Image (cartoon, rainbow, N blue to C red):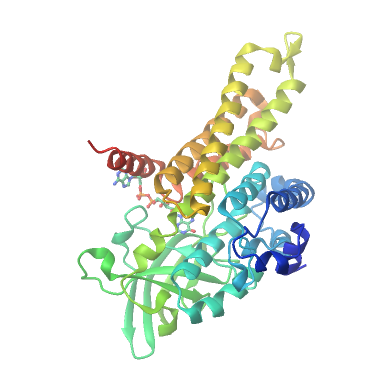
Amino acid sequence: MGTERSRQEFSNQEPSAKEQAKDEPIWTTEDENAILDTIDKWVGNDVAPIAREYDQEDKYPHQLVEQMKELGLFGATISPDYGGLGLPAATYAKIVTRVSAAWMAPSGIFNSHLIMASAIERCGTDEQKSEWLPAMASGELRGGIALTEPDAGTDLQAIKTRADKNPDGYLLNGTKTWITNSLYGNCLMVLAKTDVNAQPRHKGMSAFICKKDEGYEVSKKLTKLGYRSIDSCELVLDNRQISETALLGGVEGNGLQQVLGGLELGRINVAARGAGIAEGALKMATRYAQQRSTFGKAIAQHQAIQLKLGEMAAKVEASKLLIKDAANRFDQGERCDMEAGMAKYFATETGVYCAQEAMRIFGGYSYSTEYEIERFYRDAMLMCIGEGTNEMQRIIIAKQYIDRNRI
Ligand SMILES: Cc1cc2nc3c(=O)[nH]c(=O)nc-3n(C[C@H](O)[C@H](O)[C@H](O)COP(=O)(O)OP(=O)(O)OC[C@H]3O[C@@H](n4cnc5c(N)ncnc54)[C@H](O)[C@@H]3O)c2cc1C
C-alpha cells in the first residue's frame, strides 16, 4: 500500500474528484475520521504491543518504519503534488497525539522527517523539491534536522559547523549532536556557517540537504533516559565535500530563517506529542485506579485520587484545545506563533504533570518495568526541551503578548 492507496483508503471520495475541486478542502471530516480510525487500529495492533520490549532493550522498530511507509505517514504533510497526503496540521496533530498516547518515541521517526520535508517544500528550489520530496513522501528517503552542536542548542547562531565554498560546492566541517533519525534514516538538513564573520550572525548561516555518508557520518549513538529505541546520535562532518545543489533554496545566508520558518508546525507537533503522553498516562491511571483497592474500596473512590484524575483530565482537554486552535489557525494561513508556543508549552508541561501524577497513582508499581507508566515518566521531559525549551517558550509568548497588547 503506497501513499496513493493510503489516500484512497482514508478517503470517502475519489482523490481525483477531490483534487479537481480546488476551493474545497482536500480532506473532509469523514476523511479525518477514517484516517484516525486506521491510525487507532495500527497503534492498537502494532505499536502498543511492542513498546515495552523495544523501549527497554533500546531496539529500533524497523517493522514500524515499513508500516509507516504503507500508511503514508512519511508524506503526511507533504503536498499531493509531490506524492504526499497533504494533511492539515489539525489532522496531523491528532495522529501524533494518538501514536504518542501509546508510545511517543515512534512519532519522532516521521515527525523530524516531516520538519525537514517542510523546509524543502517551503524554501527549496524547484529542482530540490522534485528531487527530494517524492522520495521523502514514500519513505525511501527518511530524514531529520541537524542543528544542535555540543556547544550550541538554544543559541543556534553560536554553531561552529562551517560550509566553505570551493569550486566543487561546499566543504563541511563540524560536529552535531542529539540528531534524531541520523543512524537509521538516510538524509538530513544540516545548518552551517557559510560566513563566520557575518554580522548579524544569522546572515552567515545556511542550510544544506545532504545524504548520509556524503555530507556527514554518524560517530556515536547516544544512550538516553527516555525516547529510547529512536536513534539520537552525534555526527562528524570531517571535510565532507557536497555539491552546490545541496544549498537549500540556492542562496546563502537564509539558513536560520529557513529553520525558524518551520517552528510553528514544529511546535504544534511537539505539543501533540506532549498531549499524547498526558492522555496515555491519564488513561492508564484511570484504569489502574479502578482495579487497585485499599481500605476496602477501589482507589478511584478515594477523593485524593479523584482530585488527581480530575486535574489531569482537565489539563489534557485544555492541551488538546490549545493544539486545535493553533493548528486551525496554521491551516487557515493565519499567524499562530504565539498560539503554537502556548500549545507547546502547556501540552508538554501537562505531559510531565500527568506522567508524574500517574506514577503516584500507581504507587510502588510505578517503579516496576513490568508496568508501562515509568516509560511515560521518562519520555515526558524531552518534550519540554525539544523544539525550543519551555523556558524560551514562555519568554517568546510574553514578548508576543506584550507586542499584541501595546499601550
Ligand atoms: C533526545 C533528544 C533528541 C533531540 N533531537 C534533535 C534533533 O533531531 N536535531 C537537533 O538539531 N537537535 C536535537 N535535540 C537537541 C535539542 O533541540 C536541544 O537540546 C535544545 O534545543 C536545547 O539546547 P541545549 O541542550 O544546548 O540547551 P542550552 O541551550 O544549553 O540551554 C540550557 C538551559 O538554559 C536555558 N536557556 C538558554 N538560553 C536562555 C535564554 N536566553 N533565556 C532563558 N533561558 C535560557 C534553556 O532553556 C535551558 O533550560 C535533541 C535533544 C534530545 C535530548
Q: Is residue 337 left or right of residue 12?
A: left
Q: Residue furthest top?
A: 295
Quarter in which the C terminus is drawn? top left
179, above or below 216, in the image:
above
**Whole-percent x and y of residue 145?**
48, 63
Q: Is residue 110 above or below residue 371?
A: below
Residue 84 coordinates in the image, percent (x, y): 63, 67
Total numbered circles = 0
Residue drawn at the location 46% of the way across and 67% of the way down: 122
In the picture shown, does residue 257 fall above or below 267?
A: below
Residue 340: where, in percent of width, then height?
Answer: 45, 46
Q: Quadrant of the N terminus?
A: bottom right
Horizontal and vertical percent position of residue 204: 27, 70
Can you tell which quarter of the image residue 193 is in? bottom left
Q: Is residue 294 visible?
A: yes
Depth check, front residue: 69 or 167: 69
Note whether residue 104 is visible: no
The residue sitting at 29% across, 37% down in the picture is 405
Q: Determine the residue located farthest toward the bottom in the rendered image.
A: 167
Q: Nearer the viewer, residue 285 or 331?
A: 331
Which of these two is toward me, 340 or 312? 340
Q: Residue at x 36, y 68 (%)?
A: 255
Q: Is residue 168 left or right of residue 313?
A: left
Give residue 60's quadrant in the image: bottom right
| Residue 253 lies in quadrant | bottom left
Q: Residue at x 62, y 65 (%)?
A: 75
Left or right of residue 216, residue 254 in this image: left
